[in-house]
Image (cartoon, rainbow, N blue to C red):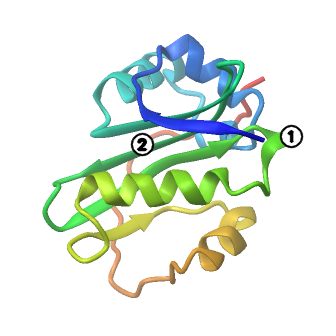
Amino acid sequence: MNYTIKEERLTADEYINFLKKTDLGSQYPKERFYERITTLVSRVSISLVARNDAGEIVGACFGITDFAYWLFITDLGVIRECTGQGIGKALVKKLHELAGGEENIIMYTCVNENAIPFYEKIGMKTPDDVMMYNRIEWTSFTVE
């Protein structure tokens, strides 16, 4: 399948419709979902979208970065019928390049256990130096 990757801001509705076609939609808490997705898509540092020849969204990747030292992948998803075709890997590579490149930027992400093999395959490792502070209410649900 042919696809192109571009920096593009999606609307909350576009992103939510995309999430319904991926396994990524289970990573968000139910609390204030629409409000928070609206903030995410409008304010994330880098927003990449992969589209097929028909212009349909087949993948998306978001990252927050300081463009000097670090990059955190907040979202990476590919629609279910297009997984395994290199789209996710290409999105991560482009995200890393836009943030400053692998010679300058350390890349992190929080990973769903089902995605661990993908991230290991693209060369990421489990770090020993990550801390977390979490005091938010988090009711799991799946975007449908």
Judge whether residue 139 can be spotted in this image. Answer: no
Q: Residue at x 76, y 54 (%)?
A: 85
Q: Residues within 10 Å of mark 1 (few under 14, many from 20)?
A: few
Residue 90 image offset from top left, x and y in percent: 55, 55
Residue 29 image offset from top left, x and y in percent: 57, 36
Q: In this view of the protein, which residue sits in the foreground, 110 or 15?
A: 15
* Residue type at tag 1: Glu
Q: Residue furthest bottom?
A: 128
Residue 65 image offset from top left, x and y in percent: 24, 53
Label of residue 81 in the image: 1
Is 67 on the left or on the right of 72, as rendered? left
Image quadrant containing the C terminus:
top right
How far apart are the two marked residues, 2 and 1, measured between alpha carbons? 33 Å
Q: In this view of the protein, which residue sits in the foreground, 118 or 7?
A: 7
Asked if disc 2 and disc 1 are in contact, CB closer than 8 Å, the reply is no
Image quadrant containing the N terminus:
top right
Element class at badge 1? helix
Q: Quadrant of residue 131?
A: bottom left
Q: Residue at x 27, y 40 (%)?
A: 45
In the rendered structure, which disc, 2 or 1, sits on the residue that comes first in sequence? 1
Q: Which residue is mark 2?
A: 136
Q: Residues within 10 Å of mark 2 (few under 14, many from 20)?
A: few
In the rendered image of this protein, does residue 14 appear above or below residue 88? above
Is 98 on the left or on the right of 128, as rendered? left
In the rendered image of this protein, does residue 84 appear above or below residue 139? below
Q: Quadrant of residue 23?
A: top right
* Residue type at tag 2: Ile
Label of residue 70 in the image: none
